[in-house]
Amino acid sequence: MVGISLGIIKPGENLEELGEKAMLSDKKPEDFDSINEYINHLRNEVVLDKEKFNSLDEKELLARSAIGASITLKGINEKLDTIVTPEFMAEVAKQQLTAQEIIGTVKAYKEKELNTGDYELYLNDELSIDESDKHSDALVSAYQKLEPELTIEQIEDKVMGLKG
């Protein structure tokens, strides 16, 4: 959803197919000026053998999905000019955050110079009080931008609710 929101992949595009095309291509992301150019290359210039693709087993499809997700994550990092960790993406997916909430959180973390890799530590109360306060402040800031109609108390409740 985040990749779609940022225009990295198109609605309906399949991460497994993207991963398969990456495996078939003789070019790598480093051969292009941007990850979007690489994805366009995969989308427009690499032909998928549908019959072969449809005969892949679950394990092979999972591997291709991981490659597609990795390419999409590179695109997210490039677009937001930051480092979003796979662990962060896994955690926000578990929380069922919207794409806008995820993007808002990433932008707030970048602005406050926080590492998205520490997000799970924050949620699990594994950071120092000082570090935890920085994460709380970043998340409150993100939700103030996302939902300006809410009061500060409602936003603080929402942020505390993330720790569930």
Image: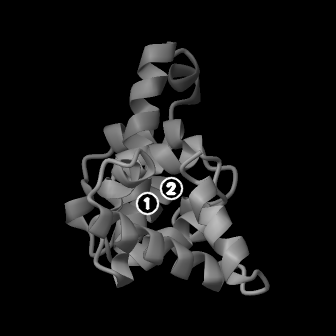
The residue labelled by disc 2 is 43
**Number of other residues with Cα within 10 Å of mark 1, as a class: few under 14, some 14 to 19, many 20 or more:** many
Q: Nearer the viewer, residue 72 or 163?
A: 163
Check if mark 1's residue and mark 2's residue have beta carbons within 8 Å.
Answer: yes
Q: Is residue 49 left or right of residue 144?
A: left
Residue 107 visible? no
Residue 35 x %, y %: 35, 66
Q: How many marks?
A: 2
Residue lying at the far right of the rendered structure: 149
- Image point 43% across, 16% down: which residue? 59
Residue 72 x %, y %: 44, 55
Residue 2 x %, y %: 57, 61
Disc 2 marks a residue whose amino acid type is Arg
Q: Is residue 114 left or right of residue 143?
A: left
**Number of other residues with Cα within 10 Å of mark 2, as a class: few under 14, some 14 to 19, many 20 or more:** some
Q: Is residue 2 above or below residue 55?
A: below
Q: Nearer the viewer, residue 140 or 147?
A: 140
Q: Is residue 97 above or below residue 16?
A: below
Q: Is residue 81 left or right of residue 151?
A: left
Q: The C terminus lies in which quarter of the figure?
A: top right
Residue 128 x %, y %: 26, 59
Q: CA distance from mark 1 to mark 2?
A: 6 Å
Query: Which secondary structure, mark 1?
Result: helix
- Image point 67% across, 59% down: which residue? 98
Residue 133 visible? yes
- Image point 42% across, 32% down: which residue? 64
The residue labelled by disc 1 is 39
Disc 1 marks a residue whose amino acid type is Ile
Q: The N terminus lies in which quarter of the figure?
A: bottom right
Q: Is residue 160 left or right of residue 131?
A: right
